[in-house]
Amino acid sequence: MQQTFKIIDEDGIHARPATALVNTATKFKDTEAFAEAKGKKVTLKSILGVLSLGLETGDTLILITEGTEAAEALAALQEVMIKEGLGEVYL
């Protein structure tokens, strides 16, 4: 499953929001979660991976989940993106 977001936070995705995404992804043990942006795909279970994407305002981010709890994980990650003011769903 996947969902695309447009980054709206004026600081992009930095350490604090990246930590919130990693903590959420890590809760789903039987599900893999990835972030894809700028032609690079990283695991959402690594803070360094997320930060290495260098996401800035206006960038597009695709969150991808695979596994037994893919739908639940994607919903939780989407909630973090919106609640933290990081991004909005991009169609």
Image (spheres, rainbow, N blue to C red):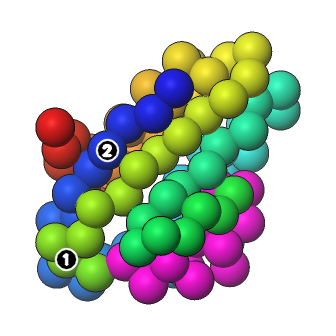
Camera-side residue of 52 and 27: 52
The front one of 1 and 10 is 1
Q: How many marks?
A: 2
Picture coordinates of residue 75 (x, y %)? 44, 26
What kind of residue is marked 1?
Thr
Residue carrying label 1? 57
Report x, y in % for residue 61.
36, 58
Residue at 61%, 50% (x, y): give it: 34
Residue 78 spot, x, y in % from top left: 38, 37
Instruction: Describe the element under mark 2 as helix, strand or loop.
Output: strand
Q: Residues within 10 Å of mark 2 (few under 14, many from 20)?
A: some
Q: Return the x and y of residue 32 as percentages of the image width and height.
A: 73, 38
Q: Is residue 19 visible?
A: no
- Whether residue 59 is visible here, answered yes or no, is yes
Mark sitting on residue 4 = 2
Q: Is residue 25 above or below residue 51?
A: above
The first of marks 1 and 2 along the sequence is 2
Range covered by the magenta-colored residues:
44-55
| Left or right: 58 as drawn, with respect to 39 | left
Q: Look at the image and say whether residue 24 sits in the magenta stretch.
A: no
Q: Amino acid at mark 2?
A: Thr
Mark 1 → mark 2, Cα distance in angstroms: 14 Å
Horizontal side of residue 67 vs 64, given as left or right: right
In front: label 1 or label 2: 2
Q: Can you tell which quarter of the image residue 43 is in? A: bottom right
Identify the element where label 1 is drawn: loop
53 in the magenta segment: yes
Query: Residue sitting at 60 percent across and 34 percent down?
Result: 65
80 lies left or right of 64: left
Q: Is residue 57 positioned above or below 60 on the image?
A: below
Residue depicted at x 27% and y 50%: 5
Q: Is residue 89 above or below residue 1?
A: below
